Amino acid sequence: MTSALWTHIVKDLRIEWRSLDAIVSMLFFSGLVVVLFSIAFDPRGATSQQISGGVLCVATMFASVSTLNQAWGREIRHQVMDAQRMAPSSGAQLYLAKVLVNFLFVSIVQIALAPVFFIMYNLHIAGNAWILALVLPLGTWALVGNGVFFAALSIRSRNRELLLSLILFPIFIPALLGMEQATTSILTGDSDPWLWIKMLTGYDIIFTTASLLLFDVVFHAE
Amino acid sequence: MDERSILDHQFVVAAYTVTWVIQLGYLAWLGFKWRSEKRNAERRLHNSR
Amino acid sequence: MKKLALGLFPVITVLLMVWGYHQAIYVAPDDALQGYIFRIIYYHVPSASVAFLFFAISLIGSIGYLAFRRSNPARALAADAWALAGAEVGVVFCTVVLTTGPLWGRRAWGIWWTWDARLTTTLVLWLIYVSYLLLRRFAAGPQMQTLAAVLGIFGALDVPIVYMSNRWWRTQHPAPVFGGDADSGMKDPTMVHALLWNMLAWFCWGMLVLFLRYHVERRHQQYAAQEAEEALAGAD
């Protein structure tokens, strides 16, 4: 890991450690979403196993958006962005650092949320449980990777938060499908999750590569 | 003409109508945009004189 | 001479439209399986083809803008105008597809909608390009074109993924396929001719509207550039 990448990561982690606002707000918001879904779609019903995968994915999505909205918030104030641009490291490293840090935050929230989720939906895993540990990070990476990139795209717009969701969700749809299908097939043991895992991996590789290549264009367009 | 084909006919009419409403509606909007650009250009020309 | 050609094109387009309509409603026979409702195909399929073509034009415009914005700014601006025109008119045609499709599906297959590969891809494409247009509207400043161009590329990357993932989804969970055999059902030559005439008519209409949109955008770019120049000059 290059020193610039490491510096960016440490900086963001340190800021978060001092205030904890991203993680706390995400935890609360996603917990709220799970409760709301439990009320809206009865978890005691026969279909609860089928829909729980989808509910978990959508809860992750909403939770992530709340943190992604302020992913660049710290850089916007006090002309930090300009300082970043003048730094000798490439924009791609800044991007990757942000993705890694936000990925960590969202994963922490997912791990915290999973037991709550299992309890509320009375889930029992019919398939291989350890594959979930592969599927969830892949899906989260897709969300956070694209989310950080599009958050940078929408920095200077009027409705910054709204625009991020509007841009992110359509492009995220195939990854959402993959994540939900894989999770459901693991939970119900009905079908083979590996097709979806391969698709998610492909999606992650394609979009991470595109983001790394195009981030400098976006970064210096400001 | 039986029930089914009357409804079929209505749906075809609806589809064709919706198509033209969308297309002509967009063309009309484009026309307004053209006019406002022309007015902007004329105003500029007038101001620079 | 050019003016004459320019004036003639809309006339020809309208004539083609009328002819296409006549072919679709009065000449082509009812479909053997679906009956009268099949005639929606003559507006639905050409609109889909034009929409996809124009989205491709938009993508090329986006790439062109990013490629030329430093080396040849004038060409880059033209490319950006194509990107916007292609996206906007593409969304118009895609909206037609998404409204005529369910009307057809409801009568022919009993369902308004299904999540098969084609429909899902079309819907996602529509969502992506609407979000592209929203970015162009909400983003401020001259950087907007760069950001929009990048989004255009991302959107285009997504489309084949959506299609493939939906195909896999459907092999696991088979469900009704909209219009799966519609094209293979066109054995009657009059129906094929009707479809081709309407393809041509809608293609001409699409090109007409696309060129108009491009032209309006170019004017707007000129106006914006002149305004910027004046603002700079008057800042002394």
Image (cartoon, coloured by chain):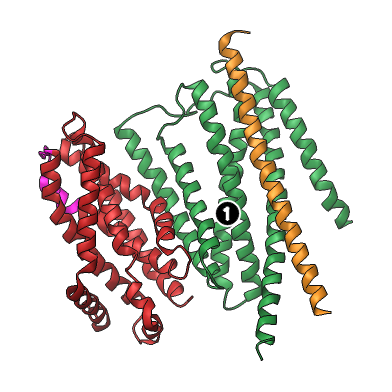
Chain colours: A red, B orange, C green
Q: Quadrant of the C terminus of chain C?
A: bottom right
Report the residue at 29% width, 46% height from top.
Answer: A178
Q: Dot 1: what SS?
A: helix
Q: Give the image location of residue A216, x and y in percent.
A: 42, 75
Report the residue at 15% width, 52% height from top.
Answer: A113
Answer whether residue C129 is visible to the viewer in this image: yes
Kind of residue at disc 1? Ala
Q: Nearer the viewer, residue A60 or A73?
A: A73
Q: Nearer the viewer, residue A208 or A145?
A: A145
Residue range (magenta): A122-135
Answer whether residue A193 is visible to the viewer in this image: no
**Does the magenta run of residues contain C76?**
no
Q: Give the image location of residue C36, x and y in percent.
A: 61, 18
Q: Quadrant of residue A12?
A: bottom left
Q: Quadrant of the N terminus of chain C?
A: bottom right
Q: Give the image location of residue C139, x and y in percent.
A: 51, 66
Q: Residue furthest top?
A: B2
Task: Give above or below for A73 relative to C193.
Answer: below
Task: Give above or below for A22 relative to B11.
Answer: below
Which residue in the structure is indicated by mark 1?
Answer: C87
Counting labels gives: 1
Task: Give above or below for B20 relative to C104.
Answer: below
Task: Give above or below for A132 relative to C135.
Answer: above
Report the residue at 34% width, 83% height from top.
Answer: A89
> On what subunit does the disc labeled 1 rest?
C
Q: Is residue A122 left or right of residue C135?
A: left
Q: Is residue A1 left or right of residue A70?
A: left
Q: Give the image location of residue C188, x and y in percent.
A: 63, 21
